[in-house]
């Protein structure tokens, strides 16, 4: 269907909204039986790279020289010697090998060491096995933290789940940048001085100091995966 140049997507000075109708797929070097949707990269001014890797069965993503975090969206892959299904995650440098057709959110970033601190060791986990915390005491907004709160890590990755009608308690303006993938539901995101309807499948990049706020709409919870540079 021809959309006559219309899209919800936007590319502004301090933020990017990439909607599925704008996705372009191309393999990254070393990929076999897989392709990538690059959502944000240093070419846009970010200090990290985030992409969705789409694997055929037996597809392969080679090791990374940078630290890498992966979150399985669907299907099954092997990372750090462990099998991971949807909701599984891994941190490290190693390859990713698909056992079935699969989609994986991938975040890669050069490690920024602190004096006297070594780069963290590889690990894996399952998101739903983690405890959740109410944001600012609001039980309608739950956070699951997948990176340990340890100063050796230079970024954090969380999921945030909003019950219908729940919203951030303030417009945030801060030094950290974000990469955000909508996993479920939808709502309204304020980015800079604009308000956008967003839904599952959308990706958002927020530059440092971009004004930001989200409120969930609809009759089911909204959930997203969010990256932030941290403790540097």
Image (spheres, rainbow, N blue to C red):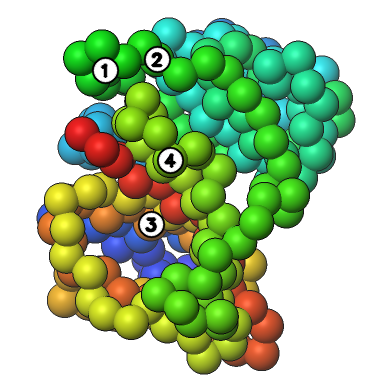
Q: Which mark is residue 113?
A: 1
Q: Is residue 79 left or right of residue 42?
A: right
- Residue 59 in sight: no
Residue mark closest to the camera, 1 vs 3: 1
Residue matched to label 4: 149
- Residue 82 in sight: yes
Residue 86 vs 150, above or below: the answer is: below
Residue matched to label 3: 204
Q: Are marks 2 and 3 in contact (CB under 8 Å)?
A: no
Mark 1 and mark 3: Cα distance apart in space? 27 Å
Q: Are marks 1 and 3 in contact (CB under 8 Å)?
A: no
Q: Are marks 2 and 1 in contact (CB under 8 Å)?
A: yes
Tag 4: Cα neighbours inside 10 Å, few (<14), some, or many (≥20)? few
Residue 29 spot, x, y in % from top left: 50, 12
Q: Is residue 173 left or right of residue 205?
A: left
Q: Nearer the viewer, residue 231 or 40?
A: 231
Mark 2 and mark 4: Cα distance apart in space? 14 Å
Residue 52 spot, x, y in % from top left: 56, 38
Locate the C terminus and report the quarter of the image it occupies.
Answer: top left
Residue drawn 22% across the image and 48% down it: 176
Mark 3 and mark 4: Cα distance apart in space? 24 Å
Tag 1: Cα neighbours inside 10 Å, few (<14), some, or many (≥20)? some
Q: Is disc 1 placed on a helix, strand or loop? A: loop
Residue matched to label 2: 119
Q: Is residue 152 left or right of residue 52?
A: left
Q: Quarter of the image holding residue 5? A: bottom left
Residue drawn 38% across the image and 29% down it: 153
Residue 187 spot, x, y in % from top left: 48, 80
Q: Are marks 3 and 4 in contact (CB under 8 Å)?
A: no
Residue mark closest to the camera, 3 vs 4: 4
């Amino acid at each position: 269907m021809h959309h006559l140049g219309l899209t919800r997507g936007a590319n502004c000075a301090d933020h990017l909204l990439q909607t599925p109708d704008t996705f372009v797929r191309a393999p990254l070097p070393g990929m076999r039986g897989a392709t990538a949707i690059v959502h944000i990269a240093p070419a846009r001014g970010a200090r990290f790279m985030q992409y969705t890797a789409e694997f055929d069965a037996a597809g392969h993503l080679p090791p990374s020289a940078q630290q890498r975090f992966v979150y399985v969206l669907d299907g099954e892959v092997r990372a750090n010697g462990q099998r991971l299904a949807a909701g599984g995650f891994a941190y490290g440098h190693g390859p990713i090998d698909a056992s079935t057709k699969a989609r994986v959110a991938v975040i890669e970033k050069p490690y920024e060491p602190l004096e006297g601190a070594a780069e963290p060791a590889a690990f894996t986990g399952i998101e739903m096995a983690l405890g959740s915390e109410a944001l600012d005491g609001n039980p309608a907004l739950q956070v699951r933290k997948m990176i340990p709160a340890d100063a050796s890590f230079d970024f954090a990755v969380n999921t945030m789940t909003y019950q219908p009608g729940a919203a951030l308690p303030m417009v945030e303006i801060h030094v950290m940048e974000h990469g955000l993938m909508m996993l479920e539901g939808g709502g309204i995101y304020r980015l800079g001085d604009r308000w956008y309807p967003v839904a599952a499948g959308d990706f958002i990049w927020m530059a440092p100091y971009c004004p930001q706020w989200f409120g969930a709409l609809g009759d089911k919870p909204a959930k997203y995966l969010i990256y932030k540079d941290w403790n540097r």
